[in-house]
Structure formats: C-alpha cells, structure tokens
Image (tube, rainbow, N blue to C red):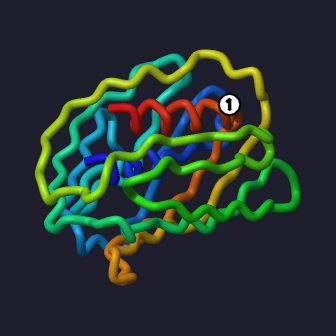
Amino acid sequence: LGLVAFLGAALLSASDCEGSIAVSRTINELAMAELKVDIDGCKKTDKYGCSDFSTEWGKNLSGSVHAVLKNDLGKGSHFIASMHIKTGIFPIPFNLQCKLCGEPCKFKVPILDKEMEIKLPACPLKASSADKKFNVKIPTNDPIPLKLAVDGVINVYNEAGKEVAAVHVNVRTSKPSSVLYLSETALES
C-alpha cells in the first residue's frame, strides 16, 4: 500500500486560482495493481476513480482508497519521476529515481532547496489489498507565495525492469511546500 500511497500523493495538482487546489492526473499503465481513489467533490472520474477535483487551502480533503497489489515487488523494484518545475518563465528539470522498498528515498527539491527523505517499507512489498478512508487537512498558510507548475511522468518498474505503472502528473499551485506536505502526510499513513 506504500507504493499506492506514494502514487496517490504524486497525483496532486493545483489550479491558478489563489487559495485553491485543483487535482488532475492520468494513469497510462497500471499492470501491477488495481486502484480506485474516490475523493469528495470530484469533478471527473475514470476507471481508477477521481481524476479531477478541487479544494481550498485550510480545508480537509477526504475520500477513500481501494488498492490491490497483484504481485510481490522485490528489492530491484523502483520508480523514475521525470518532471519539470516552473515558477517563472523557464521550467527546471526535476528527475528522481528511487527504490520502492528496502531503503529511504532521498532527494533535494529544486526551487525550495530542501533535502527530503521518504521512509519506504522493507522488501519485498507483498501482494495484498487494502480499503482505507482518508481525511487530510490542507495547510491554511504557506511561507512560500510562489506560483508553481509541475508536469511530468512517474514510471514504476518491477525487479525485472518491466514497467508496471505509468502516471502523468500535472500540478499547479501558488504554495508549493503545501503540495510537499500533502505528499509526506500521505506517505506516512
């Protein structure tokens, strides 16, 4: 479920409206799992659940996740995120590759110049299923008042190197550290 939480957190995006967050994502491949994420206030859905929603800063984001990991994912399983972050005219590349289990994912966030570490579970990630409700408080204030756009793809590979998931992510916000807060919160559950 940690992998699903990571992918779910990565799906967040925000609109150009000050003080609001709008979310959209496209899952192009998901051979390793079944996934359905329902979010209260969803505007658009597909076979994986909510693909487009919005909320406001300071509000709660709630819904439910149904996830089934079909096969174990071993020590060599990893993900590659190929993103571009834009706060002005020119996008800054942000590429990240981490194992899915067995060691923490460490990276530095450009723009914020902040070191991050995401604790990941031990290997292997065992085939399992979970149904979970969530209710996450979105921060009211953020000390970094920058408009932010993030666009890219997250690809997930099993230990044999076969792609088992591909998710296109488009993020727009005026408060980038809140997106990171949501990601860290989702990963801790």
Could you tell me the amino acid type at mark 1?
A: Glu
Residue 155 location (% of width, % of height): 46, 71
Instruction: Look at mark 1 in the image and give the residue it sits on.
Output: 18
Question: Would you place residue 90 above or below residue 140 in this image?
Answer: below
Q: As rendered, which of 117 and 81 lies closer to the eye?
A: 117
Q: As rendered, which of 97 and 24 lies closer to the eye?
A: 97
Residue 80 location (% of width, % of height): 53, 68
Which image quarter is the C terminus in? top left
Question: Which image quadrant is residue 18 in?
Answer: top right
Question: Would you place residue 117 above or below residue 140 in this image?
Answer: below
Count the marks: 1
The residue sitting at 19% across, 65% down in the picture is 72
Question: Which image quadrant is residue 127 in?
Answer: bottom left
The residue sitting at 44% across, 30% down in the picture is 185
The residue sitting at 86% across, 61% down in the picture is 90
Left or right of 173: which side holds 98? left
The residue sitting at 54% across, 36% down in the picture is 21
Left or right of 131: which side holds 84? right
Left or right of 49: which side holds 181? right
Question: Would you place residue 79 above or below residue 2 in this image?
Answer: below
Left or right of 7: which side holds 179? right
Residue 89 location (% of width, % of height): 88, 57
Seen from this angle, which residue lies furthest right? Answer: 89
Q: As rendered, which of 159 and 111 lies closer to the eye?
A: 159
Task: Look at the numbered disc 1 and give the secondary structure of its residue.
Answer: loop
